[in-house]
Amino acid sequence: MCKKFIALILILWTTCEVNAQTLTIEDQLKNLSDITFKKVKSSKSTYELKIKQPLDHSNPEKGFLHQKVYLTHTDFTHPTVIVTQGYQLRKNREQEVTKLLNANQINVEHRFFGESKPDSLDYSFLNLKQATADLHHIRTLFDKIYTKKWISTGISKGGSTTIFYKYFYPNDVDASISYVAPLTNSFEDKRIYDFLNSIGTKECREKIKNYQTRLLKNKAQIIPILKSYASQADWKFTYLSIEEAFEYSVLEYPFAFWQWGNNCEEIPSEKDTFQKDVIHYFTMDPISLFNDKSIKKYGSHYYQAATEMGYYGYEIKDFKDLLVSLPTDKNPHATFVPNKMKVDFDGTLLKKLHHWIENDGNNFIFIYGENDTWTSCAVPENDKIDAEWFVMKDKHHGNARIKNMSKNEYQRLCSALERWLELKIEK
């Protein structure tokens, strides 16, 4: 009797599973709560979703936001990649690991960015605990549709979000791939200064410093040009004055230079003309980061950095006598919180995260570029966890990617994924 009962249960279970698979993805989406969707023109089955998320996952009565998500459906029997964005999500793009695994993809805009904002921006609800709870809610919803292996991935701040997501929800995914992701250790992570004082050749670093010095010395001549340029670009400078923005941009120059992999030969020297100095400055475009539009666009990011994620500042010991608009009693910090609100930094989560990842950060792939400034804040390598690190030679923030790996690096990455996901990758 018992054997017959078990057999009946198995038949019913199999029948339900088959019936579920015969439903289309649109049928499945219609059956999910908290989701509205529309088809996106694409060669694949891609949908733009709006997912209802509580502002406070521990107290839904405090209100909701609707989070923008793109779903690219491949097959119910394939793995699923959840992309943890760090900012706004302007358009959908299949990630490398999605293509590698021929997987479904759920691409998630970060809360308080882009279209994923509540009517009233109460920043007390913008923290990593709430942001990762958004991801967990999405994971829970789609677990009813996609029952195979799950992988999370993100780039830059999105890569950091991947790390925090696994910290808060270690059982949500079977593997995590984090690209060029900083994991800072404080409000002002001074490892960045050590990196900028050692990367490249001594001659290149001196060339950068001399160029910064000339820009600051020629501030009076550059500001009128900058004002004309800003007018044409329709830039406003009210959060920072244009003079403050200029000095910030000069201090930012080496960080951006190495982050995006520029060529030392292209930096003007003392022998070059003032005109060439100015042309190079506008070609590099460090000033655009500090106009009102950019500061507002990244306001939520600055808030997170200033309250719990940490960030970087600018070492000014070589330029104190040349700075006029910025204070010189301490290193200026690179965060510009919305409305200049007063916030306090709490490093408790970072300390817990560093301890956790050192001892329990398994099934991670960390990809960094050797020349990327953010690699100074990379997750430290250690042999206590089952994880793989790739610090790609001569690569930077924009090209440290799987497609640019050496043959040996690529094979090592695939071997790790095959082990963790219990599948065979078609190479």
Image: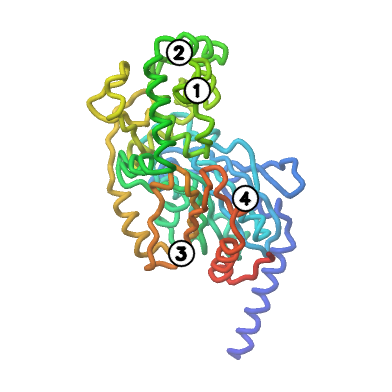
Query: What's the coloring here?
Result: rainbow
Find residue 251 and name its label: none
Precedes in sequence: disc 1 or disc 3: 1
Image quadrant holding the N terminus, namely: bottom right
Q: What residue does disc 1 label?
A: 281
Q: CA distance from mark 4 to mark 2?
A: 41 Å
Precedes in sequence: disc 2 or disc 1: 2
Q: CA distance from mark 3 to mark 2?
A: 49 Å
User: Left or right: 157 with respect to 106?
Assistant: left
- The mark lying in front, picked from 4 and 2, is 2
Q: In front: 42, or 290? A: 290
| Labels 1 & 3 near each other (Cβ < 8 A) | no
Image quadrant holding the C terminus, namely: bottom right
For label 3, the SS is strand
Question: At label 2, which amino acid type do we have?
Answer: Ile
Q: In front: 177, or 374? A: 374
| Labels 1 & 4 near each other (Cβ < 8 A) | no
Residue for point 59% across, 41% down: 50
Residue 343 position, x and y percent, is 29, 32
Q: What residue does disc 3 label?
A: 387
User: Left or right: 270 with respect to 355?
Assistant: right
Q: What residue does disc 4 label?
A: 95
Is the residue marked by circle 4 packed among few (<14), some (14-19), or many (20+) residues within 10 Å? some
Question: At label 1, which amino acid type do we have?
Answer: Tyr
Question: At label 3, which amino acid type do we have?
Answer: Ala
- Name above or below for residue 393 compared with residue 42: below
| Labels 2 & 1 near each other (Cβ < 8 A) | yes
Precedes in sequence: disc 1 or disc 4: 4
Q: How many marks?
A: 4
Q: What residue does disc 2 label?
A: 222
